[in-house]
Structure formats: structure tokens, C-alpha cells
Amino acid sequence: MTVIVNYLNGRVESLIGPAARWWQRATSTGCADVPGVLDEEAARTLRDQLIAAGLIEPATADAPRSSFSTFRGPPWEPSWGTQEMAAGLTALVPAPLRTTARAAIALAVVLVVLAAGRRRGRTARLIRLLTVAGTWARGAAPAERVRSIAHAVRRAGMVVPSRVACLEESAAIVLVLASARQRVTWCHGVAADPVRVHAWVEDALGRPVAEPPGMTARFAVLRTIPDRGEDIRQ
């Protein structure tokens, strides 16, 4: 199975079988002409659907072709419902009033950024915000500090009359810490069986913070801020 995440609008699509193999070859070469995988009609239909979804764009004959970055996630086999994942509301942990107020402000900023402008660019706007916020930091935030902020953000989210889930919470955590010139790693990944996406934060040692045990191990990390290649342990 191949899962495609559009980081402009956050849309997620999945491909299986020959369609997945077509995508893997096409993205590695930057060329939509992939012989021997799909018949001509099926390939044309798939291309049209991907264009309509905003996942690919037709290029002119003289335009340079570029390949896409692809990531191989943890090996997955159909679970047939035999694997379980923790779900449901967790107990709220007390947080200082001042910290909760800062968390509420950060959460409001995230929600405004997601709602303002065209919907097709909502995820791209959020990523730009987190990237800029990351430049404010001068050092890594201690794990306990990150955990405290995470609990404050979740408490603030309980009274917000809007959707507040892992994407909004993790982004708000980054903003609160960035305002104190502290760094944390924002992670976004995808898992299969069933297909789902998740966003979370990790401390300076790469450990997920305020997440159920084993939760993030199921996800292939597609994007991090700052990038994994940067030194985030200074």
C-alpha cells in the first residue's frame, strides 16, 4: 500500500496494487509514462484523478522533471482486527494557570492560521508557521517541560469551540515552547491498516512526549520540524 499526503491541504490518499506500483515508479522518475504496470486507459484515469486531487500537475514538454521524496514505513501486514490501539479521552493533568493561558493563545494562533485563507493551503500555512517558530529557539526543551506544555494545551483545547486534535495540539506545543526560545521536534506520520495520520512532538532524545506507549511506533514519519537532518540535540 502507498499512502500519499498532500502537505498543501492535508489531504490523504491511498493506492494499492498496480496503482501503488505505478505511483512509486512515476515519482522516482518524474515521468507519468510507466509501461507495463497499468493499461493505457487505467493509467490515464489514475493520472486524471491525481491531478483533480492536486497531487500531481501536468508539465510541459520542455519543463524540468523532478522526482518526489518517498518514505518506507514499518512493515505492515493485514491485522484482520487483531491489533489494538489505545483510544479515547485521557485524564486531564493539572497545569499552572499562566501556562494554560499561554497554551490557549498558541492554540488560537494555530486555529486562525488553519482557518484563514484558502482551504487548499491550510496545511502549508501551518508548516510555514512552525518552521519560522523553530528559528526562534536557542536550545532544546527538557522533556518534563514539553510534557507540562502538552497537558496545558490539552486543557485549553477542552474549552475551544472548534476541532482540536493531534495536529492542532502538537503545533500549539511548538509555539508555546518557541515563545520561550525552546526547541521541540514536531513530527507528522502515517500508518496503515487502517490508514490514519498522526502528529506529535518529540524531545531532544527523539522520544515521543505525552503519547500512549507504543502509539507512534506504528507510524512512518513523513515530516519533521526541524528536519531530522539538522542537529536538534544542541
Image (cartoon, rainbow, N blue to C red):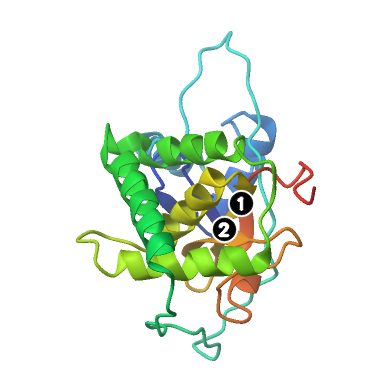
Within 10 Å of disc 2 (Cα), the crowding (few <14, some 14-19, many 20+) is some
In the current view of this chain or complex, which residue is farthest to the bottom?
A: 82
Q: Are marks 1 and 2 in contact (CB under 8 Å)?
A: yes
Judged from the image, the secondary structure of the residue bearing numbered disc 2 is strand
Dot 2 amino acid type? Gly
Residue at (75% x, 48% y) in the render? 232
Is residue 13 positioned above or below 59 on the image? below
Q: Nearer the viewer, residue 15 or 169?
A: 169
At horizontal 64% and vertical 43% (from top left) the residue drawn is: 36
In 3D space, how far apart are the residues under numbered discs 1 and 2 (Cα atoms)? 5 Å
> Mark 1, residues whose alpha carbon is within 10 Å: few (<14), some, or many (≥20)?
some
Q: Which mark is residue 100?
A: none
Of 231 and 3, nearer the camera is 231
Task: Name the residue: 40% across, 54% down.
Answer: 102
Residue type, numbered disc 1: Leu
The first of marks 1 and 2 along the sequence is 2
The residue under label 2 is 189
Residue with the most extreme top position: 62
Asked if residue 35 shows in the view, the reply is no
- The answer to whether residue 45 shows anywhere in this view is yes
Q: Position of residue 27 (x, y in %)?
A: 62, 37
Up-down relation of residue 81 to residue 107 (above or below)? below
**For the residue labelled by badge 1, is the local secondary structure a helix, a strand or a loop?**
strand
Q: Is residue 180 left or right of residue 169?
A: right
Label at residue 222: 1
Measuring from the top left, give residue 50's x and y in whole percent: 42, 39
Q: Position of residue 82 (x, y in %)?
A: 54, 91
Residue 169 picture quarter: bottom left
Where does residue 165 sit, x and y in percent of width and height?
37, 64
Q: Residue at x 46, y 43 (%)?
A: 6
